[in-house]
Amino acid sequence: MLKKFLATKARSSTKMNKAYASDYDSITFEEGLRLDLLIEDMLIVKLKAQENYHPVWEAQVLSYLKLTNKHLGYIINFTVPVIKDGIKRMILSS
């Protein structure tokens, strides 16, 4: 429900649950990964609602950035008292 709300409120091109095909060793996986939000075909957003922050989320976002050739991603965790404390910016350097 939150994903739908964010997608309708965004004033840009936003895709929810965007499936990306990925290739590995001459094998194509039609739904190799699924992004929570893809904004303007540039920004990947991973939405979470868990009390404990887990470092594997960062590894997931970095993998998403590498596989899609994007450079900017965010992890947004909504289970924090102040929302700015739940936002982590991830940049894939060239």
Image (cartoon, grey):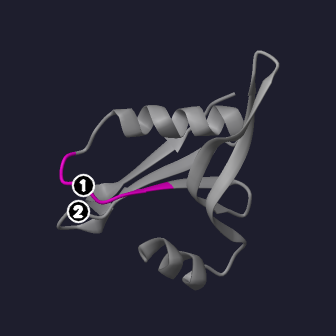
Q: Based on the picture, tell me whether residue 8 belongs to the magenta stretch.
A: no
What amino acid does circle 2 point to? Thr
Q: Quadrant of the C terminus?
A: top right
* Mark 2 Cα-neighbour bin, 10 Å: few <14, some 14–19, many ≥20: some
Q: Tell me whether circle 1 and circle 2 mark residues in contact (CB < 8 Å).
A: yes
Q: Which residue is mark 1?
A: 50
Q: Position of residue 60 (x, y in %)?
A: 48, 36
Q: Position of residue 61 (x, y in %)?
A: 51, 40
Looking at this rendering, what residue extends furthest in the right direction? Answer: 26
Q: Nearer the viewer, residue 75 or 93?
A: 75
Numbered disc total: 2
Residue positioned 54% across, 34% down in the render: 62
Label disc, if present, on residue 79 of the rendered structure: 2
* 5 horizontally vs 77: left or right: right
Residue positioned 82% across, 19% down in the render: 26
Q: Position of residue 19 (x, y in %)?
A: 67, 52
Residue positioned 66% across, 81% down in the render: 11
Residue range corresponding to the magenta coloring: 46-52
